[in-house]
Image (cartoon, helix red, strand yellow):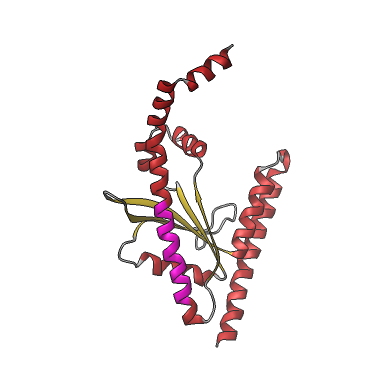
Amino acid sequence: MYENNVLGELMNPESADLIFEQVRPFMKLMTQYNCAMLEIKTKLEVLNMDLSMESDRNPFESIQCRIKKPVSIAEKLKRRGYAINVGNIEKYIHDVAGIRVICSFPDDIYKIADRLCSQDDVILVERKDYIANPKPNGYRSLHLILDIPIFLADETKHMLVEVQFRTIAMDFWASLEHKVKYKKDIGGKAERISAELKECADQISQMDMRMQQIREEIEK
């Protein structure tokens, strides 16, 4: 009976209009984040082509984009003690739009990041270098929060986009670490597994640097 009542309410035209009015600002904001993400993605692809002319190779292997799911946005606001509304999404969540750039070598990461941040319409809001200063678990990546203007039909609006740079090896480790450690109940094995994952991360970092050195030797 309760389900039938809820269904009846949702089918009521007035209720449908109310739901639409509540959802529309959120959908509009997500569209704006998507536009900002595409702006940064295009800039990165242009940089990749331009830099490939300098070194005769592409600095990055792939680029992935995503918009944070509504449930993840709501959970993040709730954890931080903020009301769940459109205004707080813009104010407190800086990684709604996310781009991950997978590079061949560590020095490619810094080269692309520096060129991107030096562009006139890109503002660097925050930079976290987990390559130079890895997280305790061994995680390595360069994180940037960028402010980019998007040109809409009736306004120009500044939006935030998070860009993560990793090497192929760093991305491989991060993906497997998440699957191994967080998808299973490891109980009393946690400390030992954490230590092993940290050791793997260190070995992968050493391999990254060695591969970069070999590349430099070849280029010389």
Instruction: Examine the rendering and report whether any part of residue 70 can be seen.
Output: yes
| Image position of 200 (left or right of 69) | right
Q: Main secondary structure of the magenta part?
A: helix
Where's the N terminus, which quadrant? top right
9 or 43: which is nearer to us?
9
What is the quadrant of residue 182 in the picture? top right
Viewer-proximal residue, 193 or 143?
143
Q: Is residue 46 highlighted in magenta?
A: yes
The answer to which image quadrant residue 102 occupies is bottom right
Q: Is residue 158 left or right of residue 214?
A: left
Give residue 205's quadrant in the image: bottom right
Is 83 located above or below residue 29 in the figure?
above
Q: Residue furthest top?
A: 1
Instruction: Please indicate, yes or no, whether residue 111 appears anywhere in the rendered image.
Output: no
Magenta segment: does it hold 21? no
Above or below, 145 against 105 in this view is above
Q: Residue at x 42, y 27 (%)?
A: 19
Give percent across and percent down for residue 67: 48, 47
Relative image position of residue 162 (x, y in whole percent)? 44, 53
Residue at 60% x, 61% y: name it: 170
Residue 165, position as x, y percentages in the image: 51, 61
Counting from the top left corner in percent of width and height, residue 36 is at 39, 54
Q: Look at the image and give the residue range highlighted in magenta.
A: 35-51
